[in-house]
Image: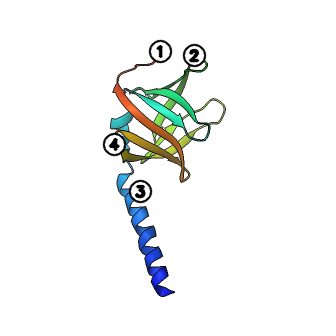
């Protein structure tokens, strides 16, 4: 029984260390998002959106299905990327580098967003 507890502890520790080592710092989040356009997949709703975060804190979301551009705000809170939402309020997520230009957003420990295809400047349909 002790062997299983030790193996379990080792596995949990390894997973925590992998997650922690790939979680972006505040500066890395700023470098990744500032003045960039990117794809946003809301994993809960399986909805693909486009985002843009400007240096002045403006967070734009383009909803292709509605051909609508929504203006919000973004900021960092320590090592978390935060955004406002007109109906759901503010939300902050940890950003984890998954490799190959793909990042996962975790809100309260749950994978809520997949972010990818980061490009310089505002590439959104205005």
The secondary structure type at the circle numbered 2 is loop
Q: Is residue 42 above or below residue 9?
A: above
Label 2 neighbour load within 10 Å: few <14, some 14-19, many 20+: few
Q: CA distance from mark 3 to mark 1?
A: 35 Å
Closer to the camera: disc 1 or disc 4? 1
Q: CA distance from mark 1 to mark 4?
A: 27 Å
Q: Say whether marks 3 and 4 touch (CB < 8 Å).
A: no
Label 3 neighbour load within 10 Å: few <14, some 14-19, many 20+: some
| Residue 67: assigned label | 2
Q: Say whether marks 1 and 2 touch (CB < 8 Å).
A: yes
Residue 12 drawn at (x, y percent): 46, 68
Residue 93 drawn at (x, y percent): 50, 45
Q: Dot 3 corresponds to which residue?
A: 19
Q: Dot 1 corresponds to which residue?
A: 125
**Which residue appears at 63% of the width and 29% of the height?**
86
**Which residue appears at 47% of the width and 74% of the height?**
8
Q: Is residue 87 visible?
A: yes
Q: Is residue 55 above or below residue 104?
A: above
Q: Dot 4 corresponds to which residue?
A: 28
Q: CA distance from mark 2 to mark 3?
A: 36 Å
The secondary structure type at the circle numbered 3 is helix
């Amino acid at each position: 029984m002790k062997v299983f507890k030790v193996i379990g502890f080792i596995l949990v520790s390894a997973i925590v260390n992998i997650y922690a080592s790939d979680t972006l710092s505040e500066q890395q989040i700023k470098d990744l998002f500032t003045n960039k356009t990117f794809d946003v997949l809301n994993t809960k709703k399986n909805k693909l959106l486009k985002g843009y975060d400007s240096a002045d804190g403006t967070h734009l979301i383009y909803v292709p299905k509605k051909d609508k551009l929504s203006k919000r705000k973004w900021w960092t809170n320590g090592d978390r990327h935060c955004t406002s939402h007109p109906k759901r309020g503010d939300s902050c997520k940890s950003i984890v580098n998954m490799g190959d230009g793909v990042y996962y957003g975790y809100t309260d420990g749950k994978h809520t967003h997949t972010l990818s295809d980061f490009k310089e400047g505002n590439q959104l349909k205005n």
